[in-house]
Image (cartoon, rainbow, N blue to C red):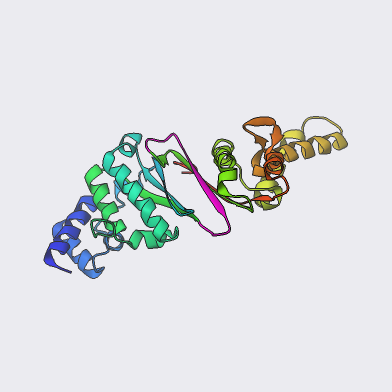
């Protein structure tokens, strides 16, 4: 490692941890310039306490999507405040991350070690951004879709510019129809995913643990109702089926025509040709944090 590079790493580590020059220099040398490992090393030695900045919650931020030739990548970049999420440097960083994610097929571990336009690795640029802005910033998750047999779509909600916003969706369909024939439907279906937040494509894909938990909630709600057990069982089944319909994409009401379900619209548009939903991914900034 060159002396200039060493000094830059030491400076970054000092800004993040508040630890003195000598200890930071030793940590950087021992970890071959890895900032994250250096922080861990200093903490293990008792020199650095858990950095307050990195223990704060980063639940604001942006979702960024990049597409090229039926391939799509989507990333979620988090910050502590919405003010930072509107920062031009933060936005540019999110845009370039999505481009890199596409090249790396959505593998976040590869994204972190990839080089950006300034020839520095993503993880090093991230630390620079944290140091400059003064907030915790994290690259939370990444998604990717491709396939010559699929027709793919994306949608961004609450956009601050093209393909960057607070909520993003990637959607993959299989059909013998051309993309131009299902272009409007694909966009509308991606909007459906954004608005209705389904948990799975169909009831068979729904996590059984989620169903079990929902059934427990319904049973607890009804057990003290004083109704006959047969009536309770019937009500419970109805409530569970309603939960399944509301949370599985094919069984949801179509937002453009609520009297019909998504699966009905697919049959209408498909006609004699089959349209199948292969995959969807929905990222909402901060959801679950």
Residue 217 seen: no
Q: Quadrant of residue 4?
A: bottom left
Q: In the picture provided, is 105 more to the left or to the right than 10?
A: right
Instruction: Give residue 86's position: percent from left, percent from top.
Output: 32, 36
Instruction: Give residue 206's position: percent from left, percent from top.
Output: 66, 49
User: Which residue is located at x 44 percent, y 41 percent?
Assistant: 285
Residue 149 is a magenta residue: yes
User: Which residue is located at x 43 percent, y 38 percent?
Assistant: 166
User: Which residue is located at x 37 percent, y 37 percent?
Assistant: 161
Residue 151 seen: yes
Q: Which residues are magenta?
A: 146-161
Q: Residue furthest left?
A: 3
Instruction: Give residue 125's position: percent from left, percent from top.
Output: 26, 54
Q: Say above or below: 143 vs 81.
A: below
Q: In the depicted view, which residue is nearer to us: 25 or 108?
A: 108
Q: In the picture provided, is 23 more to the left or to the right than 124?
A: left
């Amino acid at each position: 490692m060159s002396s200039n590079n060493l000094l830059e790493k030491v400076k970054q580590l000092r800004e993040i941890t508040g630890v003195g020059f000598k200890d930071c220099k030793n940590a950087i040398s021992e970890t071959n310039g890895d900032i994250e490992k250096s922080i861990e090393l200093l903490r293990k030695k008792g020199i650095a306490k858990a950095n307050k900045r990195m223990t704060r919650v980063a639940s604001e931020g942006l979702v960024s999507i990049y597409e090229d030739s039926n391939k799509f990548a989507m990333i979620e970049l988090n910050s502590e405040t919405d003010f930072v999420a509107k920062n031009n440097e933060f936005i540019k960083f999110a845009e370039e991350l999505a481009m890199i994610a596409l090249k790396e097929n959505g593998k976040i571990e590869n994204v972190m070690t990839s080089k950006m336009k300034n020839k520095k690795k993503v993880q090093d640029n991230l630390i620079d951004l944290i140091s400059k802005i003064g907030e915790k910033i994290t690259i939370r998750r990444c998604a990717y879709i491709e396939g010559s047999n699929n027709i793919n779509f994306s949608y961004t909600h609450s956009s601050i510019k093209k393909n960057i916003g607070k909520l993003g969706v990637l959607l993959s369909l299989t059909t013998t129809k051309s993309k131009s024939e299902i272009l409007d439907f694909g966009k509308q279906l991606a909007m459906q995913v954004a608005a209705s937040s389904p948990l799975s494509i169909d009831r068979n894909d729904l996590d059984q643990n989620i169903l079990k938990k929902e059934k427990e909630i319904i049973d607890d709600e009804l057990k003290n109702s004083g109704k006959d057990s047969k009536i309770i069982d019937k009500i419970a089944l109805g409530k569970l089926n309603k939960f399944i319909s509301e949370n599985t994409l094919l069984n949801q009401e179509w937002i453009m025509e609520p009297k019909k379900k998504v699966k009905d619209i697919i049959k209408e548009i498909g006609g004699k040709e089959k349209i199948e939903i292969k995959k969807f991914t929905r990222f909402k900034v901060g959801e679950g944090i």
